[in-house]
Image: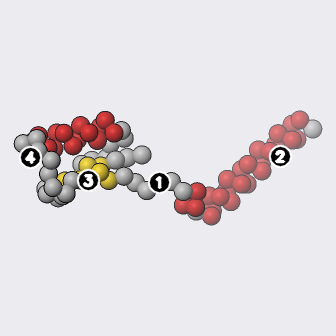
Amino acid sequence: MSLQYRCGQCRTTSPPVLTRTGLDEERRKHRVLFHGGHVPDGERVIEPEPFRFTDIPLGQWVAGALMTLVIVVGIAVRLG
């Protein structure tokens, strides 16, 4: 999951980071460099929407089902 820091006052967004620690560091550096350590109005954290299985395209579901079927049949043939 990637997170981004957004300063509403400066209208800037940080590059994506992978951890909360990285996000806190981006936020701290921005506050110190551009706002004298103060919290700017309108700052926020941008998080991606949570993953949902319904987001997977139908073609990928079909391909996944076919690959699973091939593996199961292959195992059955080897054991049978």
Upstream in sequence: badge 2 or badge 3: 3
Upstream in sequence: badge 4 or badge 2: 4
Direction left: furthest residue: 36
Q: Nearer the viewer, mark 2 or mark 3?
A: 3
Direction bottom: furthest residue: 58
Residue type pointed to by label 4? His
Residue at numbered disc 2: 73
Upstream in sequence: badge 1 or badge 3: 3
Residue type pointed to by label 2? Val
Local crowd size for mark 3, using a 10 Å CA cut-off: few (<14), some (14–19), many (≥20)? some
Upstream in sequence: badge 3 or badge 4: 4
Q: Secondary structure at mark 1?
A: loop
Q: Say if mark 1 contacts mark 3, CB within 8 Å.
A: no
Residue type pointed to by label 3? Arg
Q: Is residue 34 left or right of residue 68?
A: left
For residue 74, above or below residue 40: above
Residue at numbered disc 4: 35
**Residue shown at 62%/58% (left/top)?**
60
**Which one is nearer the viewer's eye here, 58 or 4?**
4
Q: Say if mark 1 contacts mark 4, CB within 8 Å.
A: no
Residue type pointed to by label 1? Pro
Upstream in sequence: badge 2 or badge 1: 1
Q: CA distance from mark 2 to mark 3?
A: 51 Å
Q: Secondary structure at mark 4?
A: helix
Residue 68 on image: x %, y %:
73, 48
Question: Is residue 22 among what the camera can see?
Answer: yes
Q: Is residue 78 left or right of residue 31?
A: right
Q: CA distance from mark 1 to mark 4?
A: 32 Å
Question: Is residue 12 among what the camera can see?
Answer: no
